[in-house]
Image: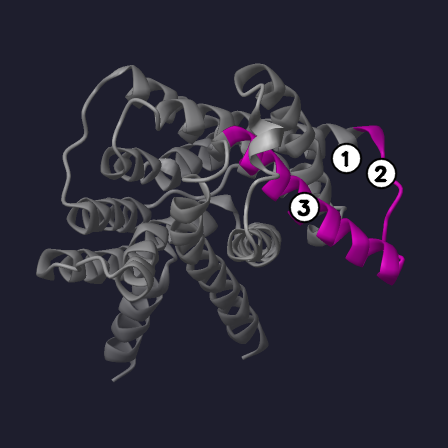
């Protein structure tokens, strides 16, 4: 019973991460109206990384890293934090949010393929069904159609680099704690983003100084709760259940974003979006192997009867 219970905790952790990221969608909608997007993202991620680094120092669990561990962590930060957010912010300037979410819904597919090729993770028919159902669910939640534009290409690059970054995080997690990986990848990626923002948004730092207490409170919540804690929980899941199964839960993010937008921004939720949620849940149950276990367990019981 110990292993199934442990797996439950890890899946529960990644569910909490998607809830925090869903809230973050609302937070970012409010923040980008006042702050320069790339600069704000750099400061937000840097704040998250420094918060986790502070916990590391207080607990004295800051391990001295080897060259290969630095390689995996810095690669994860360069791809999953810097490149992903950079291409995401550029792409969002030319396409609408619904199309962006649909493209980001491809992350589980790309992650599963990369995990199968590079990490030799199993890729069964059940996984294919799960990924397909979850993606169809995202289509229902967004109620949109994907358009092929330059912005779409930027978003596709953002998808690929994020999927590959999960593989580097997985490799690093074999010998390094999840909190150290998360802190270092966030700080490394944030520094790269900040340097880039100085070119893309010369007045970006100044925009960060003209907020009010409410905006700064939202910023801190986004940085510490959604980014630091959310990313840490997700990396813990990657360590224990693998990149492909963890990435499948990312399909919940747009739905939770929709729910919190309903409660906090008074946006409308339509019936077909609830249908999408049911499909996403079904897809996750298939993709994580739960349906497969129940199926074979029932067949085994029938044989014994």
19 above or below 184?
below
Residue at the spot of label 1:
69
Find the magenta span and give its range: 38-67
Give the CA distance from mark 3 to mark 1. 23 Å
Q: Residue furthest left?
A: 271
Q: Nearer the viewer, residue 122 or 250?
A: 250
93 above or below 284?
above
The quadrant of the rendering that contains the C terminus is: bottom left
Residue at the location (41% across, 48% down)?
Answer: 30
Q: Residue furthest bottom?
A: 305
Q: Secondary structure at mark 1?
A: helix
Q: Nearer the viewer, residue 80 or 68?
A: 80
Instruction: Please tell me which of labels 3 and 1 falls first in the chain.
Output: 3
Pointer 3 local density, CA inside 10 Å: few below 14, some 14–19, many at least 20: many
Residue 210 position in % (x across, y down): 57, 40
Residue at the location (29% across, 79% down)?
Answer: 301
Give the CA distance from mark 2 to mark 3. 22 Å
**Cβ atoms under marks 1 and 2 closer than 8 Å:** yes
Residue 20 drawn in magenta: no
């Amino acid at each position: 019973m110990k292993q199934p219970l442990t797996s439950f905790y890890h899946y529960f952790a990644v569910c909490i991460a998607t809830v925090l990221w869903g809230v973050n969608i609302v937070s970012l909608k409010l923040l980008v109206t006042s702050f320069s997007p790339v600069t704000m993202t750099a400061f937000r991620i840097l704040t998250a990384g420094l918060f986790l680094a502070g916990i590391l120092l207080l607990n004295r669990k800051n391990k001295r890293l080897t060259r290969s561990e630095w390689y995996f962590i810095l690669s994860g930060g360069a791809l999953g934090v810097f490149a992903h957010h950079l291409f995401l912010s550029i792409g969002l300037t030319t396409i609408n949010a619904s199309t962006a979410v649909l493209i980001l819904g491809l992350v589980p597919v790309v992650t599963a393929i990369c995990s199968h090729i590079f990490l030799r993770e199993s890729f069964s028919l059940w996984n294919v069904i799960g990924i397909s159902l979850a993606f169809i669910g995202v289509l229902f939640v967004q109620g949109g159609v994907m358009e092929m534009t330059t912005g779409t290409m930027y978003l596709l690059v953002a998808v690929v680099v994020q999927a590959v970054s999960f593989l580097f995080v997985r490799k690093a997690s074999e010998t390094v704690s999840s909190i150290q990986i998360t802190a270092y990848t966030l700080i490394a990626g944030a520094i790269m983003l900040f340097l880039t923002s100085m070119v893309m948004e010369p007045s970006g730092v100044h925009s960060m100084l003209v907020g009010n207490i409410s905006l700064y409170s939202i910023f801190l919540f986004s940085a510490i709760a959604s980014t630091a804690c959310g990313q840490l929980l997700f990396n813990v899941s990657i360590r224990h259940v693998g990149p492909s199964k963890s990435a499948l839960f990312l399909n919940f993010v747009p739905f939770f974003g929709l729910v919190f937008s309903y409660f906090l921004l008074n946006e409308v939720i339509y019936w077909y979006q609830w249908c999408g949620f049911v499909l996403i849940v079904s897809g996750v149950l298939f993709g994580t192997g739960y349906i497969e276990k129940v199926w074979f367990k029932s067949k085994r019981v029938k044989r014994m009867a």
